Image (cartoon, rainbow, N blue to C red):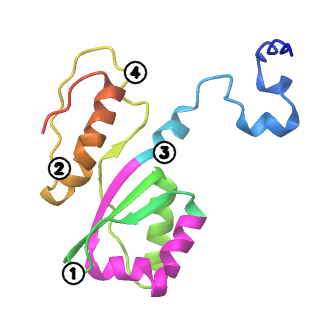
Amino acid sequence: AALAPAPAPASSSSQLPDWLQDLAMPSGPTPPTAQAAHGKKYIRMPDDYVKVLVGKGGETIRQVIEQSGAVIRVESGPRDPIGIVSITGDVAKGEHFIREALKARGYDLPELSGLVVNAGACGSQSAVRRDDIQIPTELVKHFVGNRGANIQVLERACGGAVAI
């Protein structure tokens, strides 16, 4: 049996059937504000804040994840005095809902700066650059990843070397 040739690719998502519209790649560049919001961020907070964020049986953190659409994980152990919470995806929205959940329970998390790694941020730079970033000791293992997997991803994304 002969196979029919594949149809020519559509030039825009408007030519796709309705059921494929949500899977189509955008025809233009993604707006900078949308790009900047996505990535990964680590937030340090006291252990009692982490316990409040998790909530009874994980109820609060599940609600925050559902509201924000971000992946939120507690990266520290239950006995660590300082907790580490990671937000992956829509960092700004995830952080907003974390702050709201804590505030609703009487815990005000101060504004903190943190490292946000954007998916496409490095590839757009044409000049050779070297930046030194200080990473707290307890976060190095998360930065490196399993067998250096996160370092390899960063090196591929930036087209350069990452050294610790």
Residue beneath label 1, please?
79
The residue range painted magenta reads 40-66
Which is nearer the N-term, disc 3 or disc 2?
A: 3
Q: Residue at x 79, y 35 (%)?
A: 21
Residue beneath label 4, please?
124
Crowd rating for badge 4 (residues with CA inside 10 Å; few <14, some 14–19, many 20+)? few
Give residue 130's quadrant in the image: top left
The span from disc 3 to disc 2 (Cα, nearest Å) is: 21 Å
Q: Nearer the viewer, mark 3 or mark 2?
A: 2
Residues at badges 4 and 1 in contact (C-beta under 8 Å)?
no
Q: Amino acid at mark 2?
A: Ile
Q: Amino acid at mark 1?
A: Arg
Q: Is 96 drawn above or below residue 159 in the view shown?
A: below
Question: Dot 2: what SS?
Answer: loop
Q: Residue at x 44, y 69 (%)?
A: 99
Q: Is 111 drawn above or below residue 49 in the view shown?
A: above
* Residue 59 part of the magenta segment: yes
Q: Amino acid at mark 3?
A: Ala
Q: Nearer the viewer, mark 1 or mark 3?
A: 1
Residue beneath label 2, please?
135
Crowd rating for badge 2 (residues with CA inside 10 Å; few <14, some 14–19, many 20+)? few
The span from disc 4 to disc 1 (Cα, nearest Å) is: 41 Å
Which is nearer the N-term, disc 2 or disc 1?
A: 1
